């Protein structure tokens, strides 16, 4: 058995996340208690309000710490991965778990990343939508349609599974793309719970600001295999990979395919969601897939892995 941890990305945050593991596992409490920021992270995670938790300025730090607290709870119960990956923001959780970043450095880094992205993407101007279709060629053609491009940026942000692709860009362009996609037979196009057009060229300038911070960050070689968003493969230049990540397509399908090819047969989603589990079921139906976020799900996982 070869286990991989998959760390959730932005959009799955919810009030109360991490509270259970904080109370039940010393390893989780240690993660939360080690964090010091310019806001009360524990209170925001455990008590909300949801509106503030959804603000990119705060979301990224909260999800990073919550995910790591859950992961370390699992490790304290003997559930040890040999590889990790994360969706978008989750990549920072994966790298921190793999000891490429120290926790304090990672928290400060994603705090700055969230601020940079929030400043680059004013609320109400851009967004993202999930397209439920296996026809990637159709989605790409609609994004390039003149009716869409005349209204702004519309690009493919995430290749999440064989039947879900996320598009990202200006709201008016996304709305027109949705209209065209539905007219051409796509069964569903859903707005996502995000505050801007992540993984689009609207963040190209922001990536330069992020690069300056990353260049000065203390980064070590990961202790276990990390698979990256930009390629779905292991990367040696972490700074370059993370710099390009915020304005490039997330290759989650390739990530899972490459992990399976390298022997991973058991995936454990880390975070307050089962979104990634659904993607993996489509990409690698032969794999064993679990999701953990609290004591009950960790205990259930332990029983399944015996």
Image (tube, rainbow, N blue to C red):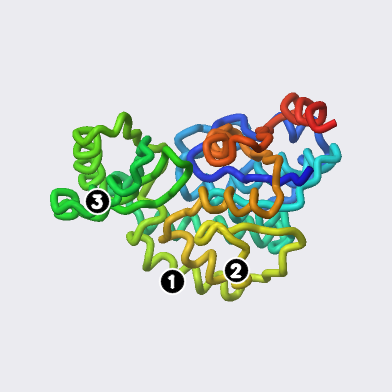
In this rendering, would 250 be left or right of 186?
A: right
In this rendering, would 197 be left or right of 74?
A: left
Examine the image and state in which quarter residue 180 appears. top left
Q: Nearer the viewer, mark 3 or mark 1?
A: 3
Residue drawn at point x = 52 percent, y = 47 percent: 58
Q: Quadrant of the C terminus?
A: top right
Badge 2: few (under 14), some or many (20 or more) residues near its Cα, within 10 Å?
some
- Residue 152 in the image: state x and y as whole percent: 21, 54
Residue 238 image label? 2
- Earlier-in-chain disc, 3 versus 1: 3
Task: Name the one closer to the observer, 90 or 37.
Answer: 90
Secondary structure beneath label 3 = helix
Residue drawn at point x = 34 percent, y = 61 percent: 201
Secondary structure beneath label 2 = helix
Mark 3 to mark 2 CA distance (whole Å): 32 Å
- Residue 21 in the image: state x and y as whole percent: 74, 33
Secondary structure beneath label 1 = helix
Task: Name the one closer to the observer, 38 or 141.
Answer: 141
Examine the image and state in which quarter residue 132 appears. top left
The residue pinned by badge 3 equals: 141
Task: Name the one closer to the observer, 182 or 120.
Answer: 182
- Residue 126 in the image: state x and y as whole percent: 30, 48
In this picture, is 24 found above or below 52?
Answer: above
The residue pinned by badge 1 equals: 208
Look at the image and tell me whether residue 289 can be seen: yes
Badge 1: few (under 14), some or many (20 or more) residues near its Cα, within 10 Å?
few
- Residue 263 in the image: state x and y as whole percent: 71, 50
Residue 33 image label? none
Q: How many marks?
A: 3
- Earlier-in-chain disc, 3 versus 2: 3
Mark 3 to mark 1 CA distance (whole Å): 29 Å
């Amino acid at each position: 058995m070869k286990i991989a941890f998959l760390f959730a990305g932005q959009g799955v945050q919810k009030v109360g996340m991490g509270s259970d593991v904080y109370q039940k596992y010393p390893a989780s409490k240690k993660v939360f208690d080690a964090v010091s920021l310019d806001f009360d992270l524990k209170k925001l995670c455990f008590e909300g309000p949801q509106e503030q938790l959804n603000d990119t300025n705060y979301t990224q730090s909260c999800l990073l710490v919550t995910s790591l607290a859950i992961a370390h709870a699992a490790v304290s119960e003997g559930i040890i991965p040999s590889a990790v990956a994360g969706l978008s923001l989750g990549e920072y959780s994966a790298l921190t778990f793999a000891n490429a970043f120290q926790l304090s450095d990672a928290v400060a880094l994603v705090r700055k990343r969230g601020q940079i992205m929030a400043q680059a993407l004013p609320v109400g101007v851009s967004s993202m939508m999930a397209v439920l279709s296996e026809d990637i060629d159709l989605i790409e053609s609609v994004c390039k349609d003149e009716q869409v491009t005349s209204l702004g940026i519309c690009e493919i942000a995430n290749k999440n599974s064989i039947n879900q692709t996320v598009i990202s860009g200006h709201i008016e362009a996304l709305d027109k793309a949705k209209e065209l996609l539905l007219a051409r037979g796509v069964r569903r196009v859903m707005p996502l719970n995000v505050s801007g057009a992540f993984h689009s060229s609207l963040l190209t300038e922001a990536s330069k600001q992020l690069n300056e911070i990353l260049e000065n960050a203390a980064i070590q070689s990961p202790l276990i295999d990390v698979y990256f968003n930009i390629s779905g493969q292991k990367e040696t230049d972490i700074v370059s990979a993370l710099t390009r990540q915020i304005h490039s397509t997330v290759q989650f399908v390739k990530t899972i395919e490459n992990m399976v090819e390298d022997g991973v047969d058991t995936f454990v989603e880390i975070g307050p969601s089962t979104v990634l589990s659904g993607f993996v079921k489509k990409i690698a139906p032969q794999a064993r897939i679990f999701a953990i976020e609290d004591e009950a799900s960790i205990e259930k996982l332990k029983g399944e892995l015996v």
